[in-house]
Image (spheres, rainbow, N blue to C red):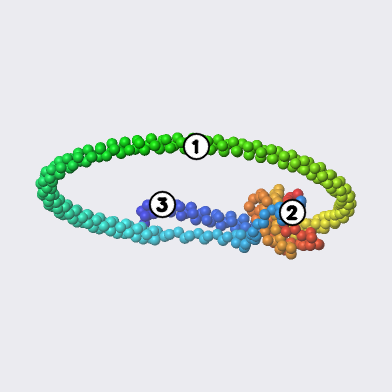
Amino acid sequence: MLEKIAENWRAVLLAVALHALVAAFLIFGIQFLHNSASKGNHGQSIVEASVVSTSDQPAQPPSPPTEKQAKPQPKPEPKAEKKPDQEAKAAAAKQKAQQQAAEKAAQQKAQKEAQQKAEQEAAEKAAKQKAQRQAAAKAAQQKAQKEAAEKAAAAKAQQEVQQKAAQEKAQKAAEQKAARERAEKEAAAKKAAQEKAQREAAEKAKQKAAEEKARKEAEAKKKAAAEKARQEAEAKKKAEEAAKKKAAEEAAKKAAAEKKAREAAAKSDLQKALAQESAGRQNAANQKAMARYVAAIKDKVEGNWIRPPGTSNISCKVKVKQLPGGQITNVQLLGSCGSTVVDRSVKQAIYKSDPLPTPSSDNLFQPEIEFTFRPDQ
């Protein structure tokens, strides 16, 4: 048994170290949770609250916290150590499995060698049969070549007789063809001379017609230019008269428009001054009501916030999306509050404040609200 333990000393040391780490984690984790639950900070203030419109920031999907995020996860129980006799049994089973694997590998190797030997014998038999077939084919090929050579000699003699007769016939045909070509050449030369004379006569007639056409086109062009100049002069005169008339009409219209614009501007200035005065009074009332609305939201959120242990100098911006009834649909941090623990505590405080207080007037409601979270100032 001691020899088994000596062989597996690394595994034994690793198991002991793992159990020690698990025990330390459980002790310190329970103490940390106890301290965190006993501490808290109520009454911290939220300052520098502001209101933004819906168009300034893109909509974000709601992400409410879950119980799984809020509660601490249970710690895994440490595993029991294996007994020495169990380790001995495991080592014996492992050795037996290795022996069986070696026997199986040897059997597979013997089968593979037998199969390779059978394949080699089959290949040798196939090669012998192939050599016999090739020898028979070569003998048949030699016989065919001999018969083909005899036939080729006979055909060659017959071909020489036919070529001689064909040469005599071709020579006679060439002489007849040369005579025909000389006659055709003389007829073509005569025809070419006649066609040349006809082309020259046609070129002269065509040149004369082109000169006559150019003279007529020049006269027509000159006449058209004179008519165009006369029409352009008349059109220019009419355009000048129309431009003068249009300028006079536009001057009259411009004077009337300027007068009307001055009257409208005076009326608009008066209406604008009255509207600004009314808007100033309304804005002042809205700012007071908005300040009360923001203060109510700030008081409710800071009453629900619990400070994580060991945190200070917290500062971050939070954007809250809500429905008209004050129901929170999304909370987004516009920057970290210092750590993930603080970020989570701020989000939980805002979700815990659902629904948020509603304003005194419906026109003061904003679907998105930004807070500057600074509890230490």
Looking at the image, residue 175 lies above or below residue 41: above
Question: Looking at numbered disc 2 in the image, what kind of residue is underneath it?
Answer: Val
Cα distance in 3D space between marks 3 and 2: 67 Å
Q: Earlier in the sequence, mark 1 or mark 2?
A: 2
Residue drawn at (55%, 59%), measured in percent from left and top? Answer: 75
Question: Looking at numbered disc 1 in the image, what kind of residue is underneath it?
Answer: Ala
Hey, which residue is sitting farthest bottom in the picture?
Answer: 325
Residue, disc 1: 205
Cα distance in 3D space between marks 3 and 1: 125 Å
Cα distance in 3D space between marks 1 and 2: 94 Å
Question: Looking at numbered disc 3 in the image, what kind of residue is underneath it?
Answer: Trp
Residue drawn at (65%, 60%), measured in percent from left and top? Answer: 62
Residue, disc 3: 9
Q: Is residue 285 left or right of residue 32?
A: right
Q: Tag 3, which secondary structure?
A: helix
Residue drawn at (48%, 52%), measured in percent from left and top? Answer: 17
Circle count: 3
Nearer to us: label 3 or label 2 = 2
Rendered-image quadrant of the N terminus: bottom left
Could you say which disc has been placed on residue 336 in the image? none
Query: Which of the 4 image quadrants contains residue 72?
Result: bottom right
Percent of width and height locating residue 330: 67, 59
Nearer to us: label 1 or label 2 = 1
Q: Residues within 10 Å of mark 3 (few under 14, many from 20)?
A: few
Residue drawn at (79%, 62%), measured in percent from left and top? Answer: 362
Residue, disc 2: 52
